[in-house]
Image (cartoon, rainbow, N blue to C red):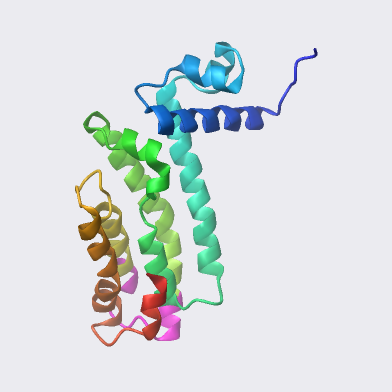
Amino acid sequence: MPRISKDPQERKDEILNAAMELFNSKGYEQTSVSDIVRKVGVAQGTFYYYFQSKEEIIHAACERNLASRLEKVKQLVASTERNALEKLTRLLMDAYPSDQEAAVLDYLHQESNSTLHQKWIVAEITALLPYARQIVRQGVAEGTFRVQQPELAAEFLLVGASFWYDRGIFAWNDEEYAEKRQALAGIIDRLLIGGGPAPASDASTQ
């Protein structure tokens, strides 16, 4: 039977998907490269053609997750159905990866990976900042954001939310985590609207 040759990017994604499935089901430490190639049905040399190690798989997963999130953020910013306050609230709510990215988060949250963890938080903040600033400019044009230096206020909020919502840094329980997310609209109100009454649409972004 002739060997099936796949597009390199398709093969790389296939290996990455298989690795993430195994990391999620077995755990990162318990998954070997042999497990990954067995699941994909390729030789071990094929794995090392695309990835130097399991650690590189995590880097690739972080990059792919960030790229996916940025596509959603671009759609959010371009939306004509939401005002600036709704957009900024949603952006900040999604400032940190969801629990669905469990394998990546479990790896990054290990104490030995604290430097890598912080590196990726900074990378995500840096990638999201231009979109936050664009939303703020919309809010200023709408007359919603009335404080001085609103872009710096939005930057402060994004940095704060990225760390505040990170359970690898703060061991919030579910109740504490929900409470902090619910407090976000009021914090935005104080920093960007100037403490005036928040629009009724806030609740729809929670």
Location of residue 196 in the rendering, given as x and y in whole percent from the top left corner = 26, 87
Location of residue 111 in the rendering, given as x and y in whole percent from the top left corner = 22, 32
Q: Quadrant of the N terminus?
A: top right
Q: Is residue 179 magenta?
A: no
Above or below, 153 against 122 in this view is below
Above or below, 45 against 22 in this view is above
Please state the total of marks drawn on the protein image: 0
Q: Quadrant of the C terminus?
A: bottom left
Residue beneath the point at 80% across and 14% down: 2
User: Left or right: 40 with respect to 145?
Assistant: right
User: Left or right: 21 with respect to 149?
Assistant: right
Location of residue 36 in the rendering, given as x and y in whole percent from the top left corner = 51, 21
Q: Dividing the picture into quarters, in which one does residue 42 lie?
A: top right
- Front in this rendered view, residue 89 or 194: 89
Residue 148 in sight from this viewpoint = no
Residue beneath the point at 55% across and 71% down: 79
User: Left or right: 81 with respect to 27?
Assistant: right
Residue beneath the point at 30% across and 76% down: 192
Q: Is residue 146 magenta?
A: yes
Magenta range is 138-152
- Front in this rendered view, residue 51 or 19: 19
Residue beneath the point at 49% across and 14% down: 34
Q: Dividing the picture into quarters, in which one does residue 180 lie?
A: bottom left
Residue 153 in sight from this viewpoint = yes
- Residue that extends furthest to the right in the rendered view of this protein: 1
